[in-house]
Amino acid sequence: TFVSPSFARKRTLNGTQVELDLTTLGHCGKRLQTREYVVTVHLNNGSTRTLRAYEIPRLTVTKPHLENDLSKFAKFFGIKKSQINNAAGEASLLIGARHLDLHPKLVKVKDGIGLYLSNLGLPYWLVGTTSTSTGVTQVDANFVDAHPRDFFTNWAMTDHLGLNTEPRC
């Protein structure tokens, strides 16, 4: 699990200086001087989890879905548009493989688009690609905006699967 420097600063987290051996997909490992933090996350069911997280300079960045795409896919899956995560910008927290139970669960796949249910933030997010007569529409969600919920005011945007992150782990 990783956090951005801005995440740690905004929450005035007290970290411990550590040396981290980081190996990324397709690359040799490198040693990184960083800080280790203890981060508490608030889940949609009202419970909390404590995670050990390491600061790295940069996580992923993503763009929001287009409003007409959100409407189309909400109707497509029979859910409310307001329930679909539409985070944009730089991620602050990347939840790693040690916490797979916190990762979104696949609910349904329809015509190349996956509907996932999340424990954090808004309940749904979309991943996949669909072909249309006018071209190809790419639909991805690299992280979840956890700010809209009241009990998330001290929380951050997350990247559940580590998609498009640098470094990959």
Image: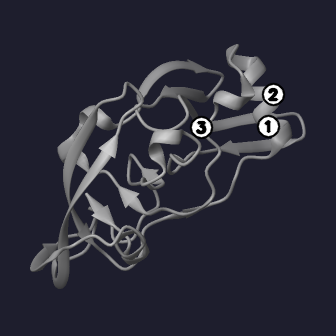
Can you tell which mark lies on residue 69? Answer: 1
Q: Real-space Cα distance between discs 1 and 3?
A: 12 Å
Q: Amino acid at mark 1?
A: Asp
- Name the element at disc 2: helix
Provide residue 27's location: percent of width, then percent of height: 25, 74
User: What residue is at 66 percent from the left and 22 percent from the top?
Assistant: 111
Q: Amino acid at mark 2?
A: Lys
Whichever of callouts 1 and 3 sits on the residue coming sooner in the sequence is: 1
- Front one among 111 and 65: 65
Determine whether label 1 and label 2 are within 8 Å by CB: yes
Q: Is residue 160 left or right of residue 24?
A: right
- Name the element at disc 3: strand
Provide residue 65's location: percent of width, then percent of height: 72, 47
Q: Is residue 144 above or below residue 28?
A: above
Q: Nearer the viewer, mark 1 or mark 3?
A: 1
Can you tell which mark lies on residue 143? Answer: none
Q: Nearer the viewer, mark 2 or mark 3?
A: 2
Name the residue beneath numbered marker 3.
128
